[in-house]
Amino acid sequence: MSPNELAYPTLVMPDTVERTTVKIWSNGVGLDADIYRPKELGGDQRVPAVVLSHGWGGSKSTCERYAAKFAAAGIVSLCFTYNGWASSGSSVLLAGDSPELDEKNEGVAKVRVIREVVDPVEWLQNYRSAVDYVEGEPNVDPDRIGAWGTSFGGGIAVHHAANDDRIKVLAVQVASLASVLKGPLLVHARQRAVDIARGTIAPVPQGIDAYPPLAGTPHLARFLQYNAIEEARKLQIPTLMLDAGNEELFDIRENSGKAHDALKARGSAPVHYKVIDGIDHYGIYFGGFDEGSEAALDWFTKHL
C-alpha cells in the first residue's frame, strides 16, 4: 500500500471520551494538537498520560484511533502534528537581507515559510514540547507519562524516551530506528551540511532532496545529528516494539529487532518484541490495528 493512497478508517469516538483541539508552542511555532480525556475525570483525580507521535508524512489524525482507545481505558492522550505539516504552523526564514530595526528591535522583513521538511532535530524539540504540554494538563500524573510512536515517529519517541526521565513507559510500532545515511547518501548529507554553513544553499534546503515514496523532503544535514538505534541502547524503561511481518521500507532486524536484542541483553527493564504476520508497513493501521493497539494498551495498562 502506497503512503499516498492512505485513507485511515474513520474514528468512532467512544461515548466515554472527549476530544479538545489545543495548540502546543514549540520553538515559537504553534503545533496543532488534540487532547483525548476520559469524560469522568475531575477534582483531584490523577491518571497516566501518553504522548503519541505520527510518522513521516502523517499528522495528528494518524494517531487518533489509538489515542481514543487509550483514553477510553482511562489514559489522557495527546496527538499532535509536527512543525510544517498539515494544519500545524511553520518555521520561517528571512528571504532576503536582515531588515533595518528600530529601537525596539522591530522591522519589516520578507520571509520564507518552511513546509513539509523532515527535520529530526526539530521533531525531537516538538515532541519534548508535547510532553511539556501534557505534564501541565489537569488530572495528569506527571510521574506516569508514556510515549507512543509509529514509523519514523516511533524513532523520535525512542530517541526522546531515552533522554527524558519523565517518560516511564514506551510503545512503538513499525519504528524506523537505524540511520538512513549510508554510503553515497551519507557523503551527500555531509556536503549539504558544508553548503549550509558556507551559505551556498538555503539554511533549510526545502524540496531539494526527495525521498520517494515518502512525502516532503528530509533535512539531510540534520539527519547527521540523529540516530535512534544508538539512543535506544540507553533505554531503561518498559519498552514494547511491534513490527510488520511484510515490512517493505526497511529491515526490521536492523531496527526494532536489533534494539530489542540489546535491551534484552542488558535486562534493566521489561522489553517485548512482536512481529505481526501478514501485514506490510502501512497495514499496521488497517489489518494490524486491533492487534497493535491492544498490545500497546495492555503494555501501558500494565506498566504505566
Image: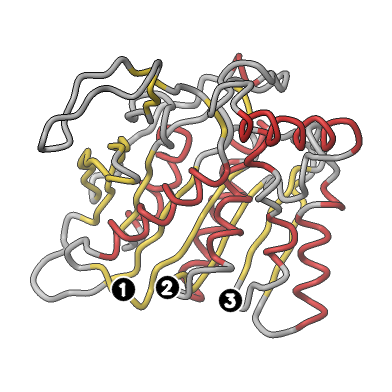
Left or right side of 190 for 21: left
Q: Is residue 31 above or below residue 77?
A: above
Give the CA distance from mark 1 to mark 2: 7 Å
Mark closer to the observer (2, 3): 2
Q: Which residue is mark 2?
A: 166
Please state which amino acid type lies under the numbered disc 2: Arg
Q: Which residue is mark 3?
A: 237
Please state which amino acid type lies under the numbered disc 3: Ile
Q: Residue at position x 63%, y 21% from top?
A: 200
Q: Position of residue 51 (x, y in %)?
A: 41, 55
Element under disc 1: strand
Element under disc 2: loop
Q: Residue at position x 35%, y 63% from top?
A: 49
Q: Which residue is mark 1?
A: 142
Do callouts 1 and 2 mark residues in contact (Cβ within 8 Å)? yes
Q: Residues within 10 Å of mark 2 (few under 14, many from 20)?
A: some
